[in-house]
């Protein structure tokens, strides 16, 4: 909860300052997406909140749950159907920084590659670790308006592979609720999640 409060205060402070610096909407970051998730998945744990702002092709936001908090900033490259984001934050007591690339090279398909360096992976001792902190790769294929299939592979103290499926229900043009399940092949256990998305 402390991580969530910190990131919400930081994002709100930036947003208010940004609104005050320019009266031209094109020069202001605009709220474009809020996502809240509960449960477990390859990307979330417990209560997880993500907030995204956009100004033309610039993207800014943050994400937090009880284990980690991070911010991201980067650019949308429409001609490449790709977003490139610098990311950084804390996992438990360990600071880290990395790069995330999100690409949609084909209709209904999105791929994510995310790589970070940081302190000791378990956060049990402070100190910069020149080796990899984590790696995350995933592909998402939307087979219908409501159903998306996924396959994720993440490395954090060992590799895990998680095939999954998500079912979304549009409420109106801006809101969706969703539920999903992923299955960890290494641990032989399912991860269940539920949440909502608000998009402008």
Image: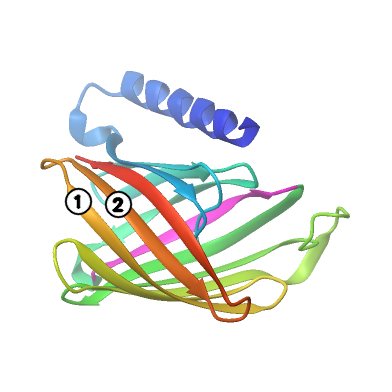
Quarter holding the N terminus is top right
Q: Badge 2 local density, few (<14 within 10 Å), some, or many (20+)?
A: some
Give residue 67's position: percent from left, percent from top: 65, 47
Which residue does the image show at 80% across and 60% down from the upper left?
A: 128
Q: How is the image coloured?
A: rainbow
Relative image position of residue 73 (x, y in whole percent): 44, 50
Q: Which mark is residue 20?
A: none
Q: Which residues are magenta?
A: 81-92
Q: Look at the picture and state if 186 lies above or below 127.
A: below
| Residue 121 located within the stretch drawn in magenta | no
Secondary structure type for disc 1: strand
Count of number-bearing discs: 2
Residue found farthest to the left? 173
In the rendered image, residue 86, in percent from the top left (x then y), is placed at: 50, 57
Of the numbered discs 1 and 2, the one sitting upstream in the chain is 1
By secondary structure, the bulk of the magenta-drawn segment is best described as strand
Q: Is residue 53 above or below residue 91?
A: above
Is 88 inside the magenta-drawn segment?
Answer: yes
Q: CA distance from mark 1 to mark 2?
A: 6 Å
In the rendered structure, the answer to whether residue 155 lies left or right of residue 196 reads right
Which is more toward the observer, 69 or 29? Answer: 69
Residue pictured at 47% horizontal, 64% vertical: 100
Q: Is residue 76 left or right of residue 67?
A: left
Residue at the disc numbered 2: 178
Residue that carries the numbered disc 1 in the rendered image = 169
Asked whether the beta carbons under mark 1 and mark 2 sit within 8 Å of each other, the answer is: yes
Does residue 182 appear to the left or right of 146 in the view shown?
A: right
Residue 107 falls in which quadrant of the image? bottom left
User: What crowding class fits label 1: few (fewer than 14 Cα within 10 Å), some (14-19), or many (20 or more)?
Assistant: some
Residue 97 position, x and y percent, is 62, 58
Q: Residue furthest top?
A: 20
């Amino acid at each position: 909860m402390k991580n969530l409060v910190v990131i919400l205060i930081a994002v709100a402070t930036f947003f208010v300052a940004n609104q005050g610096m320019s009266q031209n909407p094109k020069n202001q970051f605009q709220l474009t997406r809020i996502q809240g998730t509960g449960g477990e998945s390859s990307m979330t744990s417990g209560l997880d909140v993500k907030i995204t702002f956009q100004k033309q092709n610039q993207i800014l936001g943050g994400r937090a749950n009880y284990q980690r908090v991070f911010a991201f900033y980067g650019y949308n490259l429409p001609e490449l159907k790709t977003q490139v984001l610098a990311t950084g934050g804390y996992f438990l007591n360990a600071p880290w920084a990395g790069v995330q690339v999100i690409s949609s090279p084909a209709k209904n398909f999105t791929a994510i590659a995310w790589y970070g360096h940081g302190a000791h992976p378990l956060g049990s001792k402070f100190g910069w670790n020149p080796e990899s902190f984590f790696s995350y790769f995933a592909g998402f294929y939307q087979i219908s308006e409501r159903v998306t299939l996924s396959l994720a592979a993440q490395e954090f103290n060992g590799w895990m592979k998680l095939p999954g499926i998500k079912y979304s229900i549009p409420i109106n043009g801006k809101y969706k609720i969703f539920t999903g399940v992923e299955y960890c092949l290494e641990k032989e256990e399912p991860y269940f999640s539920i949440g909502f998305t608000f998009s402008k």
